Image (spheres, rainbow, N blue to C red):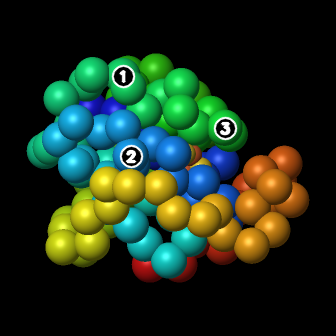
Amino acid sequence: AYVVTEPCIQCKYTNCAAVCPVDAFREGPNFLVIDPLECIDCDACVSECPVEAIYPDDEVPEKWEDYIDLNERLAESWEDRIINETQDALDDADEWAAKEDKLDKLVE
Ligand code: F3S
């Protein structure tokens, strides 16, 4: 399955969700995740993300490996929060896009 990682936090551009053929994206307040039980590894979302937040699970950078479990866990808690179209990115998304170590900003 594909995994959404840290760059998405506080940005949520949502371009990814509109191209998913199986509606695998789930939406939280300031982050999206991919439900690993729905993802069919089609790769369509990767190039849509302007901040390169999405990776196949076997290519997630080591510093973001925890996001594999995080996507699985949050996909369960956000299971009825399907997002399959674009919406406006969060305020200040472009500013947050350049920042690192944002995990403490994640709102569940
Ligand atoms: Fe997030 Fe990128 Fe999608 S910022 S919402 S993974 S387009």
Q: Which residue is mark 3?
A: 50
Label 3: how many Cα within 10 Å (few below 14, some 14–19, many 20+): some
The front one of 88 and 74 is 88
How far, Cα to Cα, is label 2 from label 1?
13 Å
Element under label 3? loop
Q: Amino acid at mark 3?
A: Pro
Q: Which residue is mark 1?
A: 43
Query: In this picture, is 1 found above or below 36?
Result: above
Image quarter of residue 53: top right
Pointers 2 and 1 in contact (CB under 8 A)?
Answer: no
The spot of residue 16 in percent (x, y) is 45, 42
Element under label 1? loop
Q: Residue at x 75, y 61 (%)?
A: 93
| Label 1 beta carbon less than 8 Å to ligand 1 | no
Q: Amino acid at mark 2?
A: Ala
| Label 3 beta carbon less than 8 Å to ligand 1 | yes
Label 2: how many Cα within 10 Å (few below 14, some 14–19, many 20+): some
Mark 3 or mark 2, which is nearer the start of the sequence? 2
Label 1: how many Cα within 10 Å (few below 14, some 14–19, many 20+): some
Is residue 28 shown to the viewer in this render? Answer: yes
The spot of residue 30 in percent (x, y) is 56, 71
Element under label 2? helix
Foreground mark, 2 or 3, reads 2
How far, Cα to Cα, is label 3 from label 1?
15 Å
Image quarter (top left, top right, bottom left or bottom right) of the C terminus: bottom left
Query: In this picture, is 73 found above or below 25?
Result: below
Q: Which residue is mark 2?
A: 18
Image quarter of residue 20: top left
Is residue 104 shown to the viewer in this render? Answer: no
How far, Cα to Cα, is label 2 from label 3?
14 Å
Q: Residue at x 68, y 39 (%)?
A: 51
